[in-house]
Image: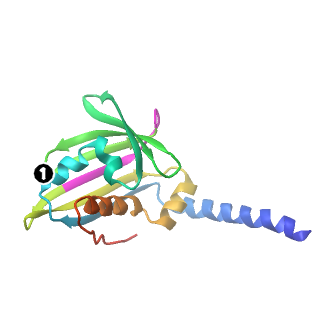
Amino acid sequence: MKWLLLIPAVVLLVIVGLFVLGLLQPVKHSVTRSIRLKEKPEIVFATVDNFDDLPNWSTSVLKVERLPARDGKSAARVTMKWGNMQMVMTQIERTPPTRLVVGAAKEGGEPLGTWTYELAGENGGCRVSLTEDGELKNPLYRAIGQMRGLDANITQTLRDLAKKFGDTADVPVGR
């Protein structure tokens, strides 16, 4: 009979532990990872600049629905494969073929952060650097992000991008 009380107590303890871990983490984070691809910056830029093609190469994106431009900038509703989470992505800055800044926000809600792609020609190909500047207000999300690695999403995106071009990406992992 005591074990019936023990199970909820353990679950509660884990949740409280995650909450405390999350409170100890900063709300804002910035992480950058980069890869080298054989393709020229113009070709890679055309790929990351095209919201509509995301489901064809990103293992995280289920579907994309174009939205009316916001302040003259391209926007789309993106549905992620995990949990069917939706977010609105808006191009904030676009300087072909070297820089693209995309903002992500909850539908009708608060901003989640930005992804900045920076491309530079290198040895006939290009170096792609991707920076995530994010904000996780919920302490449980911060704890999960810390355990999973705050770079997990951009690392996967860079690997997917390399795979699209028939390349492999040795993305340095860090915390």
Q: Is residue 31 magenta?
A: no
Is 114 one of the magenta-colored residues?
A: yes
Quick one: 29 or 89, which is closer to the camera?
Answer: 89
Q: Quadrant of residue 19?
A: bottom right
In this rendering, the answer to whether 53 lies above or below 22 is above
9 to the left or right of 76: right
Q: Amino acid at mark 1?
A: Glu
Instruction: Decide: few, some or many residues near mark 1? Use Cα within 10 Å; few <14, some 14-19, many ≥20.
Output: some
Q: Which percent across, then down, holds residue 168?
A: 26, 69
Which residue position is annotated with label 1? 42
Quarter placement of the C terminus: bottom left
Corner quadrant of residue 170: bottom left
Query: Residue 35: image x %, image y %?
Result: 23, 66
What color scheme is it? Answer: rainbow
Please indicate whether residue 44 sits to the left or right of residue 51 in the image: left
The N terminus: image quadrant = bottom right
Q: Name the residue located 46 percent from the left edge and 41 percent from the top edge.
A: 86
Instruction: Give the quadrant of residue 89.
Output: top left
Q: Residue at x 35, y 63 (%)?
A: 155
Instruction: Specify whether 96 is left or right of 141.
Output: left
From the viewer's side, name the closer residue of 99 and 157.
Answer: 157
Q: Which is nearer the eye, 81 or 139?
A: 81
Question: Where is residue 62 drawn, in percent x and y?
Answer: 42, 47
Give the percent coordinates (x, y) of residue 26.
47, 59
User: Which residues make up the magenta segment?
Assistant: 107-118
